């Protein structure tokens, strides 16, 4: 039967070369006689064993000459290099002056595609240091890394961002992450956020949650609100159709039969407010209480021409509150010709009803 089994091929030639690098085994299947193509030759196993010396195999002295019959009289072997080594070579010396001539590196060695190598003080961008002082290539998207896998990046190439938690690089931050521009890292949003622009600013929530301001909260049925302390949905005040919290002041929409007046829901508009009706785009009529003009005590609509009653010191004339011609300051003679009322007006106390009545004339004056 043709072939070799566990056959050892051996050479005793001494190259004085370093064993580091890629070794290629080339096999040519060329049988000595014709055989069926259905039974091709097969390589089952092979191994490579390299033997070396602890010191350089060549003498540091000058090489001896061959005899005149073998070489011309003037030709001789090149002398062993005895000059200074590069600073990146360790104590084992070198075979030339450059960092690529070092026998061993002081720090790290970098291998190139053409199978040559050089010694460097630090591995360049895109490479990492392994435990054998070699500079190994990072994954293609990594700028710096701790290993060759794509999930071992420390920083990313230009145009890519580091994904927090996975140590991978991507061109864009996925849902649930936002870009921290200062560190070029895609950081995680809060657990309930689907999208966010910062750690505390949600812009879209995951299913089952609703956006309240910049936070995502559990979605509650109409008429209830999310109690963050108890983490449950609780009933709004009876005056509220929807609300942001407990109490009548937290209504965001009033229940049927109630009107929104500033920040509360009421059954009827308070003095100083009028009933306003507005039709929305979908045809629904929205009723609320709006504040009267400052010149009115009560009113029927907006502006100073819709007053229905006036503050003290004013007379109602055709829907407008005018300064009363009989308005006087009480006891002007005894209060140093109105000096008291001047102080009342100067200190913005005329809005107090008692003082407004006492100082009617002065409080009614403009300026």
Image (cartoon, rainbow, N blue to C red):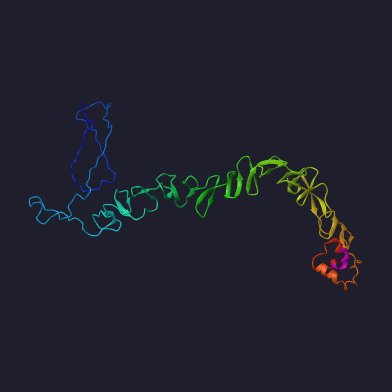
Placement of the C terminus among the 4 image quadrants:
bottom right
> At 60% from the left edge and 42% from the top edge, which residue is drawn?
206
Relative image position of residue 54 (x, y in whole percent): 23, 48
The residue positioned farthest toward the left in the image shown = 69
Left or right, residue 327 beside residue 279: right
> At 9% from the left edge and 50% from the top edge, which residue is drawn?
70
Query: Would residue 155 be counted in the magenta stretch?
Result: no
221 relative to 339, above or below: above
Task: Count up the numbered dots.
Answer: 0
> At 23% from the left edge and 26% from the top edge, which residue is drawn?
35
The residue positioned farthest toward the right in the image shown = 326
364 relative to 156, above or below: below
Residue 202 at least partly seen: yes
Who is closer to the viewer here, 82 or 161? 82
Residue 282 at least partly seen: no
Placement of the N terminus among the 4 image quadrants:
top left
Magenta span of residues: 356-362
Magenta segment's dominant SS is helix
> At 83% from the left edge and 70% from the top edge, which residue is drawn?
342
Relative image position of residue 287 (x, y in whole percent): 79, 47
Left or right, residue 131 beside residue 48: right
Relative image position of residue 236 (x, y in whole percent): 73, 43
Left or right, residue 120 beside residue 338: left
Who is closer to the viewer here, 215 or 256? 215
Who is closer to the viewer here, 184 or 304? 184
Relative image position of residue 128 (x, y in whole percent): 38, 49
């Amino acid at each position: 039967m043709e072939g070799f089994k566990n056959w050892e091929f051996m050479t005793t030639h001494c190259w004085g070369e370093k064993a580091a690098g890629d070794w290629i085994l080339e096999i040519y299947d060329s049988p000595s006689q014709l055989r069926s193509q259905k039974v091709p030759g097969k390589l089952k196993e092979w191994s490579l064993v390299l033997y070396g010396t602890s010191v350089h195999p060549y003498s540091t002295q000058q090489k001896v000459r061959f005899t005149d019959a073998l070489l011309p009289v003037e030709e001789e072997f090149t002398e062993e290099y005895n000059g200074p080594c590069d600073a990146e070579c360790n104590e084992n010396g070198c075979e030339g002056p450059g960092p690529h001539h070092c026998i061993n590196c002081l720090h790290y060695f970098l291998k190139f595609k053409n199978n040559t190598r050089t010694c460097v003080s630090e591995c360049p961008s895109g490479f990492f240091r392994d435990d054998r002082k070699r500079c190994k290539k990072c994954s293609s998207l990594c700028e710096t890394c701790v290993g060759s896998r794509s999930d071992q990046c420390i920083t990313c190439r230009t145009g890519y961002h580091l994904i927090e938690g996975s140590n991978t690089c991507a061109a864009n931050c996925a849902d649930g992450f936002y870009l921290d521009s200062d560190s070029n890292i895609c950081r995680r949003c809060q657990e309930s956020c689907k999208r966010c622009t910062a750690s505390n600013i949600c812009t879209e929530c995951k299913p089952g949650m609703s956006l309240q301001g910049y936070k995502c909260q559990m979605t509650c049925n109409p008429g209830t609100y999310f109690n963050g302390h108890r983490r449950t949905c609780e009933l709004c005040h009876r005056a509220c159709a929807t609300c942001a919290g407990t109490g009548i002041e937290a209504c965001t929409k009033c229940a049927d039969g109630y009107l929104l007046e500033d920040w509360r829901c009421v059954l009827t508009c308070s003095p100083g407010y009028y009933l306003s009706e507005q039709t929305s785009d979908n045809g629904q009529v929205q009723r609320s209480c709006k504040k009267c003009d400052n010149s009115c005590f009560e009113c029927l609509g907006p502006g100073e021409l819709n007053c229905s009653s006036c503050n003290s010191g004013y007379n109602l004339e055709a829907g407008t509150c005018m300064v009363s011609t009989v308005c006087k300051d009480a006891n002007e003679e005894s209060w140093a010709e109105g000096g008291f009322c001047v102080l009342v007006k100067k200190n913005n106390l005329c809005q107090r009803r008692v003082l407004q009545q006492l100082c009617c004339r002065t409080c009614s004056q403009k300026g």
